[in-house]
Amino acid sequence: MPPRIHDVAKALNLSITTVSRALDGYDDVAPETRQRVIAAAQSMGYTPNRAARQLRRQRTDTLGYILPATEGGFADPFASAFIAGLGDEAAAHNYDLLVSTAAPNSHQEQALYRRWVQGGKVDGIILNHIRLDDRRLDFLTESGVRYVTLDRSPTQTHFIGVEVDVQSGYDDLISHLTTQGHSRIAYIGGPAMLTMEHDRQNAYQNALRAHGITPQPDLITRANLTTEGGYQAAMRLLDLHLPPTAIVCINDLTAFGAMHAVHERGLKVGRDVAVAGFDGIADSAHTQPPLTTLHQPVHEIARQLVQLLLKHLNRQTPDPSHITIRPNLLIRASTGG
Amino acid sequence: MPPRIHDVAKALNLSITTVSRALDGYDDVAPETRQRVIAAAQSMGYTPNRAARQLRRQRTDTLGYILPATEGGFADPFASAFIAGLGDEAAAHNYDLLVSTAAPNSHQEQALYRRWVQGGKVDGIILNHIRLDDRRLDFLTESGVRYVTLDRSPTQTHFIGVEVDVQSGYDDLISHLTTQGHSRIAYIGGPAMLTMEHDRQNAYQNALRAHGITPQPDLITRANLTTEGGYQAAMRLLDLHLPPTAIVCINDLTAFGAMHAVHERGLKVGRDVAVAGFDGIADSAHTQPPLTTLHQPVHEIARQLVQLLLKHLNRQTPDPSHITIRPNLLIRASTGG
DNA sequence: TTGTAGGCGTTATCAA
DNA sequence: TTGATAACGCCTACAA
């Protein structure tokens, strides 16, 4: 049983009021008294009880993040970097991070948000994997809970969050590929309901057109953001009557799988078929061959999201209400050379 | 402002006592009354305030996990699968999961544990990356906070958690390698302070001796569990006067880096130098060549840990106080064939 | 079967 | 500058 404020007060022959104010830095406490209180609290190992403080202050100093579920919990390097970023920045501001998992659009997901919001477990929420028609956003808005998102929903009028300038990234990438002589450039995306998929596929098509190439439906396919999914989708593409000479993937994991498929068909990645990813996770520098990818600073993005959210919790709307990050094209051997 | 129990009671002309008991499933409530209460709570969207409940019940229904910090938050696929497993199982039992990051042995780490434990933020804690001399365990034991660990510390008298039978795994692996004709088998480990490193390096040496091979100090090196670290460590090994013909790595990421190094030296992984990992993350099936590795079911391990912890919170000690998991050798092309 | 009342540990208002 | 006191929302002995 940890010590209570009461114990500290008794030990010093002071009232709990004084102890509380001394520790919280109010200025109507005698300097000497404050010293004694702080010293005593330190030596007794006193830490305010969070539940009591929450109840009184009507806030939790806790942020929530719901990890988009992945059947069987597959290992996504993006996710851990993202969580680490959220955790680091939250901790830097003395906030805690509550994490849960739930399958998109599931009952559990809905129940989870209810519990968190109506039970007052969190002050604000960070969301990613935003969906084209995302009920979560409506629910949160209705409930008056503040949130920030990575990626912007088309239905979102007041966007607060971080956005990746996918178009500029894909312009760079497609430009690079056409320079290498590619014109049959395929695309492996993610689940259709994600804005991420919508945005990236659009950007891919726009970039193609900007380079005088008409997007071909049979060169556009989808997977599930995993290595295994990328492998299978790439297999399908390579089985086409007229297979692509380059494959652009929605993320690095998908690209890893695509490279494997290319190799298994007896072709050489970079020479016979170019493969590119998106994310720039650390592993991408060490694949065989190293992967050309659009790097986005995941850890930094997560920290920016937390900063935006904290500002949002304090004022009404953070000053720049959203931040745009330009991905950085890393050219490696998987696209020729 | 979400509805309170008071609001529900008023709407039904009942006392808050009755509402509370009806919702909590006490049997001294008239069936009809219970129906009405449940219906009203549902329609009003009532969810008990967590802070108040915690304060009253003196428990939080929250578990804590501190992600071992990684400078810059590099992306570790193990971590996200682990967190997903913790989150899934916790949610299945109506528990929340609090996550934070802190550098091992840092001041922040210590402060974080204090806040969580003494502030009563969590009922129990899950730990991994246990260190040889791990103060966290002493602190938690002293504080009377229940915890479970992945990996067992040598100083731990009452071990509650999950342990991986590394020895049997390395016996299988070394046996496989010697059968392939290897005898100069190197090892790339992790930070020296981790029990994980200690256990795996020991198991590697034991397995070598069991096959009549004397471990050689110059073939044993360490990295930092990342792909980049594995790359550099492997480079050092390949620069030796008498380089190894096989490299055993403490985890898959390290092995990815090692494979890259082998290739960069103009050698072929699997033919000239065998490389093996540990973890069996999804990507390992799709590297070039696919990686031989000791697979451990991360998601399942995480769930078992939560189950053990919850049992520990209810009774004094869970019945089997710990669970041993045998890793499964997946033989792929990175070790020949 | 239902209601009354006290208290979990803090913070904030007010008075001394 | 300090102290008494009333909430915050909920659960649970105890009384009715």
Image (spheres, coloured by chain):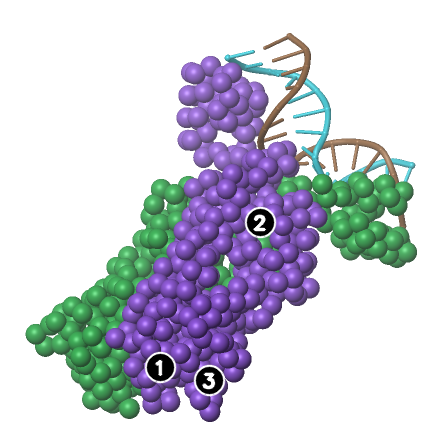
Chain colours: A green, B purple, C cyan, D brown
Q: SS class of the residue under badge 2?
A: loop
* Number of callouts: 3
Q: Quadrant of the N terminus of chain B?
A: top right
Q: Mark 1 lies on which chain?
A: B
- For the point 61% across and 45% down, which residue is it? B146
Mark 1 burial class by Cα count in 10 Å: few <14, some 14-19, many 20+:
many
The residue carrying mark 1 is: B273
The residue carrying mark 3 is: B237
- For the point 64% across and 56% down, which residue is it? B155
**Side of A94 relative to B318 (left or right):** right
Q: Which chain carries label 3?
A: B
- Position of B80 relative to B51 (above/below): below
Work out whether residue A158 can be spotted: no
Q: How far apart are marks 2 and 3 (CA)?
A: 36 Å
Mark 3 burial class by Cα count in 10 Å: few <14, some 14-19, many 20+:
many
Q: Are marks 2 and 3 on the same chain?
A: yes
Q: Where is residue A132 in the image (x, y as percent from the top left)?
A: 31, 57
- Position of B274 relative to A53 (above/below): below
Front one among A122 and A206 = A122
Query: Going from the N terminus, do you reach mark 1 or mark 2 first?
Result: 2
**Side of A190 relative to A151 (left or right):** left
Q: Which chain carries label 2?
A: B
Q: SS class of the residue under badge 1?
A: loop
Q: Position of residue A160 (x, y in %)?
A: 46, 61
Q: Quadrant of the C terminus of chain B?
A: bottom left
The residue carrying mark 2 is: B159
Front one among B38 and B259 = B259
Q: SS class of the residue under badge 3?
A: helix
Q: How far apart are marks 1 and 3 (CA)?
A: 11 Å
Asked which quadrant contains residue A328, the reply is: bottom left
Query: Going from the N terminus, do you reach mark 1 or mark 3 first?
Result: 3
Q: Where is residue B67 in the image (x, y as percent from the top left)?
A: 54, 60
